[in-house]
Image (cartoon, rainbow, N blue to C red):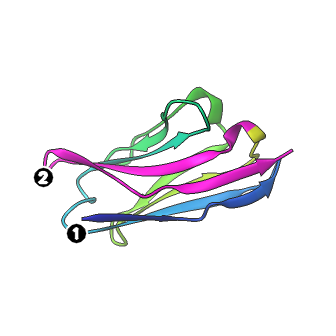
Amino acid sequence: VQLQASGGGLVQAGGSLRLSCTASGSIFSRDAVAWYRQAPEKQRELVASITSGGSTNYVDSVKGRFTISRDNVKKTVYLQMNSLQPDDTAVYYCYVNSARWGRAYWGQGTLVTVSS
């Protein structure tokens, strides 16, 4: 089982990025998936999550700016990030909570840097 994240980069404040994370192996379609982020010298925090049924949840600081979605055929989760701010600068990690295997899996992280 692997999670491969991509889409990070450097963007100016107010800009947009779309992160992707593709799973391989026997996980994803029946699992809750999420994006976390960790800024320098801060704890990792949950940014957004989506259940297997499509219900979503967001941390207050990104509501109205970020959108999480999933494509179960492609086994990919997306995070569309709009109106990015310097406080969004962090390494973003995808996460799958596998119902089948009873454990969580993490992607390798993708760096998002927002310049002011």
Q: How many marks?
A: 2
Q: Which residue is mark 2?
A: 100
x and y percentages locating residue 99 in the rendered image: 17, 47
Give the mark nearer the N terminus: 1 vs 2: 1
**In this view, which residue lies farthest toward the right?**
116
- Going by the numbered disc 2, the residue's amino acid type is Arg
Q: Check if residue 49 falls in the magenta segment.
A: no
Per the picture, the main secondary structure of the magenta-coloured stretch is strand
Compared to residue 84, the image places residue 109 above or below, namely below
Compared to residue 52, the image places residue 7 above or below, namely below
Which quarter of the figure is the C terminus placed in? top right
Check residue 25 in the rendering and tell me which mark sits there, or answer none: 1
Compared to residue 79, the image places residue 66 above or below, namely above
Q: Residue at x 78, y 57 (%)?
A: 11
In this rendering, position of residue 87 left or right of residue 115:
left
In this rendering, position of residue 116 left or right of residue 41:
right
x and y percentages locating residue 74 in the rendered image: 37, 72
Q: Residue at x 66, y 38 (%)?
A: 64
